[in-house]
Image: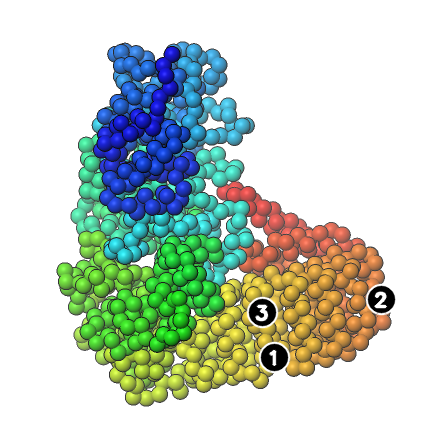
């Protein structure tokens, strides 16, 4: 009997050989040892940062030789990954440390057949075309050393018709390793995805054909090449200061399966308002990145066409990079035999007809010799197309491409991949901003990136700074300023925040300047930091040498913004006076950078918007009507003569009228620009204020006139008539300008604030509070915040202003008992002017409404109170009689949709009898107008499904349905009964559709 192997001694004796074999590609081994628990996360990160790679392996060998069990785990991992390394290592493993149960190693005789064990059988890879059976079997001849396994009886194909393993004469199964995540390296192993127990008898098994040696070698080189290309996460910056290993710097993103089309509004501002409600709505549909191509519950097959959308800078390209890296590393997506990736920026540069094979050869030379064999397996390919919104060509194609060797225009190749005429069985992932227009049914799955959650923002800050105290200080400062925190869910915005604020912390109080507190100040400080200027000087005063370049970039940014362009090409840069061969890269790399070849872009959309605003403020001549004329153009738009704007950005027309107004007219591409210029407008107002304070002296001369007078008149007039999101955008502009005299002028013109169905985040509530707070004694006729989903945090921010509202609408805002307490305090205030209070659809509960009844004893203004569907039970009526009998102003109380028993309804009847001047509506059947209002509400939800995510409407609908089913009113009219039945039927249908969506049904 052979003595047990001393694994530690074996490693030490062959240390130099192991170092030479593992050094070219240690990443898969490190990841496997980390995932298996041998390396802690700090140890793993430390090894990844160690350079050169030989030192990584030396440190790893020292670590695994510290304990015998670690040595064994190391060798087990090497055995699992052996085909990621050279043949010498594979031979050494077979000779020196054979797998248990195999005895001493011996050379395999020619012609020896290997039998397929149950373990190996259940590892066969299922990768079939959705909706089809694509059955094949092993093609490698018997007897080859790396061949597929031979089932002794019956033949492999017959196995597909009867999967029972007990019928076959199989070798005893080898010991199953605890982890099989990286078995792609060993091409002898085949995987079968786990299937539910009730599907275990499926005959739809598809075997992966054995690979030729040439294809194996090419794919190994491909993986190594992709690992090298994707291991650094540089945030669009090619320098060592900001680059880090992707395994260390990557922070998980929140992905949500979201089949609905995106809004056309400014994408990251729109998402900033929607994300809170999306979190709760899509909780059952959240996906890990590794599940992107996995079937959801009740889906029978994985998706083939996946759209991954998200706002600018939210992590689409980084997610694509992580997918590629994890596949190359073997950590995920191992159903794909090969992964190919292309960015639309690089595809846009192709001007001559090319075939798909030409594209692959040009990017992956090492695959050139095996393309026919590789493309003969389209169902095993995963193709990533990154940045569809940056493609310079239309996707309409009159010449569809069907063959991979067929030369075609690049737009026809892309069209073929998207629409399935090329590689019809391949899995395709497309990333894009929500603005890209494609048929919804083109994709099997739509996934939206919601960015960082609060914990992930914290993780990012701590990974960025590495100094826990500094990270905590910066994070605390951001959290305390709603305007700064509002976009922190965007990874690139977090980078800008950390870069701009890092030098101010730890805060000592002795610095020349305070940290920036508005978004405009953050971006000014970011630009200052990139230019390596002194901390307190801001952009002005130290920009003398960079002035021309900054204004030149600003001019390009402004023209691109007006034309909706975020990608620029060398010929466009030349038209704006740039020499693409002579751009100062060290200066520009975190502002404006060259991605590859002739493709250029701003570091982030907000950087483009900021520089465009900086240019606009710098060249503005406020002594003329230029300011208000430009504001009108930005707000209302002006369509150009001749129709649609060109896709290629033309150079500025030297004959155009000088100044900002002439330039704006020249480049304005279409009407209604406001949607795309929301953030630009905020930056413009903030920078205009900076210029007035003398902070932009090096960029612009002093003002020859006072722009505040025409600006205040323009803003006040617009605020008087606007509503919805346009009004909210105006409020943000006023807040960013932060000139109290202007704010007072605007606030004095506000008689009504209608933000109905405009979702508000904390920054929105802060802007609203600032503007309304500058006119303390102004009475507001109507403040409509219904369906804003502002939650209790938003109400707290506004509590000091609510007593001035004659009509206060807070319906369906996810408010709770605390909200009732806040409103009770307002009703008690001697300054209260509230006459109508609409609280419907909030979870106030019985405790909350008892506080409202008590407050009404002291209130002398409220005339109408709406408490439908607020969670009131009989206990909520304990003090209603005493409280309301002492109130002299209340004339209407609606309280339908609450779970009141017969005793509770009798209390309300008694109150109505004692106080006849108070109309109480407690039953749907007692008021035809109320029934019609609820029918209209259901119709609104049917027409606008986003209402189901803006508030807890599904819960409200269920409450209404339950109350309707329990309502008995013998005195109700026949018409009321018919309307009630119709309402029940429509709610039942609507709730059924919502349940279907929650369960992930297509």
Q: Is residue 279 left or right of residue 390?
A: right
User: Residue 979, located in which quarter of the rendered image?
Assistant: bottom right
Confirm or deny contact between disc 1 and disc 2 (CB under 8 A).
no
Number of numbered discs: 3
In front of the other: 103 or 553: 103
Q: At which x and y percent is residue 829? A: 67, 79
Circle nearer the N terminus (1, 2): 1
For numbered disc 3, what is the local secondary structure? Answer: helix
For numbered disc 1, what is the local secondary structure? Answer: helix
Q: What residue did someone put label 1 on?
A: 804
User: Residue 820, located in which quarter of the rendered image?
Assistant: bottom right
> Residue shown at 40%/22% (left/top)?
120
In front of the other: 928 or 76: 76
The image's mark for residue 796 is 3
Q: At which x and y percent is residue 102? A: 36, 16
In front: label 1 or label 3:
3
For numbered disc 2, what is the local secondary structure? Answer: helix
Confirm or deny contact between disc 1 and disc 3 (CB under 8 A).
no
> Residue shown at 39%/17% (left/top)?
101
Q: Is residue 359 above or below residue 729?
A: above
Q: What residue did someone put label 2 on?
A: 910
Q: At which x and y percent is residue 487? A: 43, 62
Q: CA distance from mark 1 to mark 2?
A: 34 Å
């Amino acid at each position: 009997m052979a003595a047990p192997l001393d694994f530690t001694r074996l490693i030490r004796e062959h240390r130099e050989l192991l170092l030479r074999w593992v050094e070219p590609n240690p990443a898969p081994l490190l990841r496997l040892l980390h995932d298996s628990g041998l390396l802690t996360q700090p140890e793993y990160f430390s090894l990844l940062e160690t350079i050169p790679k030989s030192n990584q392996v030396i440190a790893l060998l020292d670590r695994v030789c510290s304990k015998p069990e670690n040595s064994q785990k190391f060798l087990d991992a090497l055995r699992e990954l052996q085909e990621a390394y050279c043949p010498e290592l594979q031979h050494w493993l077979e000779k020196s440390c054979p797998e248990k149960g195999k005895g001493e190693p011996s050379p395999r005789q020619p012609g020896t057949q290997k039998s397929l064990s149950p373990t190996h059988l259940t590892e066969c890879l299922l990768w079939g075309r959705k909706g089809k059976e694509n059955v094949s079997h092993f093609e490698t001849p018997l007897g080859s050393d790396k061949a597929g396994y031979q089932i002794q009886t019956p033949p492999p194909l017959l196995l597909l018709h009867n999967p029972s393993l007990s019928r076959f004469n199989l070798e005893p199964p080898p010991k199953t390793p605890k982890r099989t995540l990286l078995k792609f390296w060993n091409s002898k192993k085949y995987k079968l995805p786990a299937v539910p127990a009730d599907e275990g008898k499926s005959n739809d098994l598809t075997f992966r054909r054995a690979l030729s040696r040439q294809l194996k070698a090419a794919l190994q080189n491909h993986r190594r090449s992709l690992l090298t290309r994707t291991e650094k996460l540089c945030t669009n910056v090619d320098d060592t200061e900001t680059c880090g290993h992707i395994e260390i710097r990557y922070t998980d993103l929140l992905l949500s399966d979201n089949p609905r089309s995106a809004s056309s509004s400014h994408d990251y501002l729109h998402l900033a308002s929607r994300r809170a409600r999306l979190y709760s709505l899509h909780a059952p549909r959240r996906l890990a990145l590794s599940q992107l191509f996995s079937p959801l519950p009740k889906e029978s097959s994985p998706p083939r066409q996946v759209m991954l959308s998200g706002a600018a800078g939210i992590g689409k390209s980084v997610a694509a990079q992580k997918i590629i890296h994890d596949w190359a590393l073997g950590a995920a997506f191992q159903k794909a035999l090969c992964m190919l990736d292309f960015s639309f920026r690089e595809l846009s540069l192709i001007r001559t007809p090319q075939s798909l094979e030409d594209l692959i050869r040009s990017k992956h030379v090492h695959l050139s010799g095996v393309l026919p064999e590789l493309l003969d397996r389209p169902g095993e390919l995963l193709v990533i197309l990154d940045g569809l919104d940056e493609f310079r060509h239309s996707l309409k194609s009159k010449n569809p491409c069907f063959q991979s060797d067929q030369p075609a225009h690049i737009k026809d190749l892309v069209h073929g991949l998207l629409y399935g005429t090329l590689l019809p069985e391949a899995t395709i992932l497309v990333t894009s901003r929500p603005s890209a227009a494609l048929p919804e049914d083109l994709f099997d799955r739509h996934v939206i990136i919601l960015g960082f959650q609060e914990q992930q923002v914290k993780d990012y800050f701590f990974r960025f700074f590495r100094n826990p105290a500094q990270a905590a200080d910066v994070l605390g400062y951001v959290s305390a300023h709603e305007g700064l925190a509002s976009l922190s869910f965007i990874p690139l915005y977090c980078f800008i925040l950390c870069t701009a604020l890092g030098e101010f912390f730890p805060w000592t109080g002795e610095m020349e300047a305070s940290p920036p507190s508005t978004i405009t100040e953050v971006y000014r400080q970011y630009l200052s930091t990139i230019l390596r200027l002194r901390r307190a000087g801001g952009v002005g005063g130290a920009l003398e040498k960079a002035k021309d370049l900054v204004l030149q970039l600003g001019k390009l940014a402004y023209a691109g913004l007006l034309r909706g362009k975020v990608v620029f090409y060398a010929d466009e840069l030349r038209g704006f006076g740039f020499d693409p061969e002579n751009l100062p890269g060290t200066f520009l790399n975190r502002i404006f950078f060259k991605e590859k070849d002739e493709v250029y872009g701003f570091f982030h959309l907000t950087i483009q918007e900021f520089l465009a605003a900086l240019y606009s403020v710098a060249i503005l001549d406020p002594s003329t009507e230029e300011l208000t004329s430009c504001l009108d153009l930005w707000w209302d738009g002006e369509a150009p003569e001749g129709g649609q704007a060109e896709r290629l950005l033309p150079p500025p027309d030297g004959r155009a009228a000088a100044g900002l107004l002439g330039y704006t007219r020249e480049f304005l591409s279409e009407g209604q620009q406001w949607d795309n210029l929301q953030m630009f407008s905020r930056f413009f107002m903030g920078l205009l204020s900076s210029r007035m304070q003398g902070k932009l002296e090096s960029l612009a001369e002093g003002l020859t006139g006072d722009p505040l007078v025409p600006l205040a008149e323009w803003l006040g007039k617009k605020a008087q008539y606007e509503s919805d999101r346009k009004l909210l955008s105006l409020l943000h502009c006023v807040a960013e300008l932060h000139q109290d005299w202007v704010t007072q002028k605007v606030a004095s013109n506000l008689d009504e604030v209608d933000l109905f169905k405009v979702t508000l985040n904390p920054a929105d509530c802060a802007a609203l509070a600032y503007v309304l707070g500058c006119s303390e004694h102004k009475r507001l006729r109507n403040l409509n915040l219904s369906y804003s989903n502002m939650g209790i945090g938003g109400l707290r921010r506004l509590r000091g202003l609510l007593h001035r509202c004659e009509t206060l609408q807070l319906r369906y805002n996810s408010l709770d008992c605390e909200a009732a307490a806040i409103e009770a305090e307002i009703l008690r205030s001697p300054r209260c002017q509230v006459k109508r209070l609409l609280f419907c659809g909030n979870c106030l509960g019985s405790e909350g409404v008892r506080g409202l009844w008590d407050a009404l004893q002291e209130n002398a203004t409220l005339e109408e109170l709406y408490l439908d569907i607020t969670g009131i039970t009989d206990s909520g009526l304990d003090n209603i009689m005493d409280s309301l009998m002492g109130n002299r102003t209340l004339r209407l109380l609606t309280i339908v949709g609450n779970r009141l028993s017969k005793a509770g309804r009798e209390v309300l009847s008694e109150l109505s009898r004692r106080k006849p001047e108070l109309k109480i509506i407690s039953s749907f059947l007692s008021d035809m107008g109320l029934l019609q209002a609820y029918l209209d509400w259901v119709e609104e939800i049917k027409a606008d499904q986003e209402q189901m995510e803006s508030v807890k409407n599904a819960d409200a609908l269920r409450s209404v349905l339950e109350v309707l089913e329990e309502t008995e009113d013998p005195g109700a009219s026949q018409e009321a009964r018919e309307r009630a039945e119709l309402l029940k039927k429509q709610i039942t249908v609507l709730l059924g559709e919502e349940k279907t969506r929650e369960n992930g049904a297509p």
